[in-house]
Every structure is written in structure tokens, then in C-alpha cells.
Image (cartoon, helix red, strand yellow):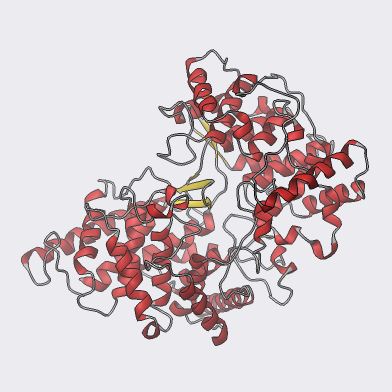
Amino acid sequence: MQVQDRDLGREGSPSAGVVSERLAAAIAANQSHLLALQDKTGYWQAELESNVTMAAEVVLLHKIWGTDKTRPLEKVVPYILGRQVASGGWELFYGDGGELSTSIEAYAALKVLGMPATDPAMQQARAFIISKGGVTQGRIFTKFHLALIGCYSWRGIPSIPPWVMLLPNSFPIYEMSSWARGSTVPLMIVFDQKPVFAIDSPISLDELYTEGYTAVKPLPAKNDWSDIFLPLDQLFKFAEDWNLVPFRKQGIAAAEKWILERQEATGDWGGIIPAMLNSMLALRTLGYDVHDPVVQRGLQAIDNFALETEETYRMQACVSPVWDTAWVVRALVESGCDRNHPAITQGAQWLLNKQIFDYGDWAVKNPHGQPGAWAFEFENRFYPDLDDTAVVVMTLNQVLMDNEQQETVKRAAMQRAANWCGTMQCKAGGWAAFDIDNDQDWLNQIPYGDLKAMIDPNTADVSSRVLEMVGETSVQMEGWRVRRGLDYLLREQEEDGSWFGRWGVNYIYGTSGALSALALVQPEQHQGAIARGAQWLLKVQNPDGGWGETCFSYNDARLKGQGDSTASQTAWALIGLLAAGEGSSNFAEAAIAQGVTYLLDSQRSDGTWDEDYFTGTGFPGHFYLKYHLYQQYFPLLALGRYRRLAL
């Protein structure tokens, strides 16, 4: 591939040498930055930012447990106030202008922490919330947290009868996504008991109701088939009112047992704050003492997700050391670091030590698979995932361990992980994040599931990662599985050539991953799909040479590929285009060179890139993430591949 952009210079021209030097300097500067961030034990990790509801909900939890005086919760006030935007509300993701449920929870937390409703910031927030319809238009989880402190009626919260825990074949608990399962089981206890906890600073939120606070808030009708759940909910509530709920005690006992069995030694549940908070609320509802070891471990796990500065105290929804470490090592090697650099081998050994050999929840629907995967977090025995596992395998493939014995162990670990991935293939041919055939969409229609995140179906981006793993490494997977995976991926391609991105924003992410896979696995058979995907990326390139896509593309597909340029999304587009054009001397050279120029021009003097936008996805349309290392290792990976292929 020859460089033909006027900014980067033609190969062989006087400016080509300058470009090569500038590129080398940019790569070296970012490598130095990342190497300096490595923990002494071998891993990399940076903040995983979401929105202020994480901190707001932790404030309520500590108030409910009476542990608020032993945490610096007063620092949550400047943190939340610092995130308030001009509209008066708080954002779900950077640039959305403010979102109702996020704003309600922020307002409630500030009031619990002592801010009067007469404060100008609170008055501005109230005006925003009322303009959006007030509390009754908020999401179920927001109303649930308000109900815990008497600021919303439990009559407006969907019932989840605890006897569900006793149904045959664990239905529908294991038809729920892992994250929904980890949150729902403890909520069966809380929703059944409907506690209203006395806190030391009780509040009222009557001012946030447009229609005035009333005792009963019935669930709203949707005017579609899902309204069938409304009379069922009324029936469940009638049974609760008259103490006619069958197997109530047995169901609660089963839920309690499930919670206790799934607590990690570190205190975590599922590695995510919602599951951790809900489990702690369930234990509080059951009357556990605050000094109980289970409770103390749970509180410590939540503390471990907190980030404190001199002025603020905030909460991460999750932590991502395995994911970050794998990508950093991969980016360092592909950008020119020695495969046996001490930092590289230390990172690889840390990853090897994190391989999971326990049978997690995935084994319920996959009884034939053997463990050997990786999770996202430090500890998460029950919920390893396909995405992390595939990336770790590709990372280990690029590392040269210190001796032949370690190399042999590494290769065995890689193959064991690939075997597990193969057994996790869904009936449709693709792969999901955590479970197999977790695709019962009717669960998203129940009143409780208003985040539309109750299931974990196979997706193009995770499927692409597994196929890329097979194509890039020496691991073996049955040919029929690979063919089914490719067929699924090709079916998922949109008419315009793009692919949907479930776990990253959005079509740029999905398309980059699909091209990376198809370019490695039987590429000669997929030239048409590859070309159409690349052409879509070229079509959505911004005038500044970069790429960007708004989170709103999940709400409106007409916005796909549109948004201000970011370093991470530009890197994804370049990775996809480089994969599509590898081996060609004239494929999209100008666009690629312009993208590289964007990255070089936007790099800061310390070798880093910065971006305000959220490019990670939790629940499309409802929850987004900003991985603070995405803007470092993805550009480094893209520049490293560009240097290898183009100069």
C-alpha cells in the first residue's frame, strides 16, 4: 500500500521521510505513556465512566445501611453539581443535553445529602424534570430507588413473584441476560417485601410530580400486545395484598441462597454495580446485620469501584482490567514493542493467571462446554464473556513468553479458551456476550424490562471477535462452526454495507470488527461484503479526516456514522479499512492517510489523545460508557498497523 495523500506525502517523496518520522514519534510517545500506566503486578486499568446515577444510587444504599458516615459522601455533591448541564438536567452520555431519569436520581441524591430545594441548581433541575413529565415518566429502576425511601409508591413498581425461582429448568431466570439475572434475583426479595427504609435525613420529592403525588401509580399501558402483562401484574399484587402468593417463603429462600452462592471472595456480584447494589438491598431487606461478613465484603467491593479525589467522590459501574490489559498489550506489540518486552510478558502472565476454570452460569444452557474463558473484571467466576476471551487469546498469540514451558502453557490456555468459545455458539450461528441462545425477546416487553436489556442475543460485533480470533491465531475450531459464524455475520450486514455495534458506538464499531474478521477468515469468498463495508466507512468520513458517531444512532439509524470525530472511532474506522485493503496497492489510500493525519494532528504533547464523547455501550439507548483508555490504545493500534502496511 502506497501513501498518496498530500498531507502525508507520496512514498519516495521528500515528505515521506518526514511522515515516517512523525508517525514514529507519535507511536513512541503513546507507547511511553501506556507503559508508565502499568500496575506493578502487570495489569492496566483506567476509569470506566458512565453517569451520575451510579453515585446517586450508592448514596441511597449507604443511607439505607447507615454506613454513610464512614464514606466521604459529602464529596458526591460537588461531583454531581459539576455534571449538571445548561438545561438544568444531567446527561446519560456527553452531549445529550440532559435525560429525565438520570436527572431525577441526581436531584434525589443531592436532596438526601442536604441540598435544599430552594438552591438555584436544584430549582433549575426541578424545572428540567417537570418539563420532561416528572417522576411518573421515569424508568422503573429510578422509581424503585425512590420507593425505597418513601418517595414513590410501591404500587407503581412491577411485581416479581419469588416463586419464579422454583420454576422447572430455572425458567425464565436463565433466559435473562447475565446482567439482568444478577439484578433480578435479589430484586425478587426486595419487590416482594416492599421495604420503605428510614434514613437519617428523610426527604420528600413531591415537587417532582407534575400531577401531584398520589398513593397509587398504576403501570402505564403501551397499547400493544405487551399490555397482557398488566392484568398479570394486578393479579400478582392482589395475591401479595391477601398473602396468597404461593411458595413465597421457599422462593425467597431460593433467591437468598442464589445470592450467597454467587458472591465472589472479593465481595462482588457479577462484577457490576447494579447487581452489587441490588444484592446488598436484598440482604438489608432480609435483616442481615451490617457487621455480617457477607455484608462487609459487599460494602468493600462497592468501595473498590469508587474513585476519590480531593474534591469529589464518584462511582464506576464496573472495572475493566482484563479488557484494558489485553488491548494495551496488543496495541504495544502491533505498534512495534518487542514481543518479549518485560512489560509485555508481565501483562501476558497476569492475563494467564486470570483464566477462569469454574463452571459459571453459562453452563446451565451449555452443559457440554468446559471452562477456560476470561471475564472483564478482576474477579468474576460466574460470568466470563466471549469478547474478553477472544481478545485475550489474540493478545497472548502476539506475546513471546520467557521460556518454552511458559509458551506451552500459553498455547494450551489459548486452545482451551477457543474450545469454550466454540461450545458457546448460538443456534443462529453467531456468538453472544455471556450466554448461549439467550434470545427470548418477549422478556424485554415485561413491565420490569423497560431498559430493553433483558436478553443477550448473538451479535455481529461479538461474533466478529470470535471469528477474528480463529483467523489471527493458531487455535483450532471446527470448520462447521466457522462456516455458521461467517454465514451469520454476512446475514447481519446492513443494506448500506455497515454492521450494527452492540458493545461500542455503533455502526463504525460493528463495521470495523466485521471487516477485521472477514479479512482473516476465507477473505476471498467475501470480497463483496468487505468492499461494501469499506465503502460505507469511506462514505461517513468527516471533512476533518476523522470519524465519529453519536450515541443517538441507537435511537435513530439515520444518524449512523454521524458525529464529531473522536480518536477511538477514527481508529476503529482505520482498523477496518486497513483490514479491508490489506494486500492492495490502491485501496482507499487517501481516506486512510487523512484519518492518520487526523490522529497525528489531534495527539497532545504528552503523547495522549483526549475525547469527551462516550464510545462504549452498556445498553443501547439507555446506558453508555466512556472507557478512558479507548482513546489511547485504539489509536496506537491503528497507527501501528498503518506503519506496518503503508510505509
Q: Height in image: 642 above or below 166?
A: below
Residue 430: name its quadrant. bottom right
Name the residue rendered at 42%, 55% in the picture.
557
Q: Nearer the viewer, residue 28 or 331?
A: 331
Q: Height in image: 303 above or below 124?
A: below
Q: Nearer the viewer, residue 18 or 270?
A: 270
Residue at the far top in the pictured view: 118
Query: How far from the left and from the top, in percent, is residue 32?
Result: 33, 54
Q: Is residue 437 left or right of residue 238?
A: left
Name the residue rendered at 91%, 46% in the picture.
249
Q: Is residue 94 left or right of residue 67?
A: left
Can the viewer see residue 31? no
Name the residue rendered at 89%, 42% in the picture.
239
Can the viewer see residue 413? yes
Query: How far from the left and from the top, in percent, is residue 58?
Result: 63, 34
Q: Nearer the viewer, residue 175 or 435?
A: 175
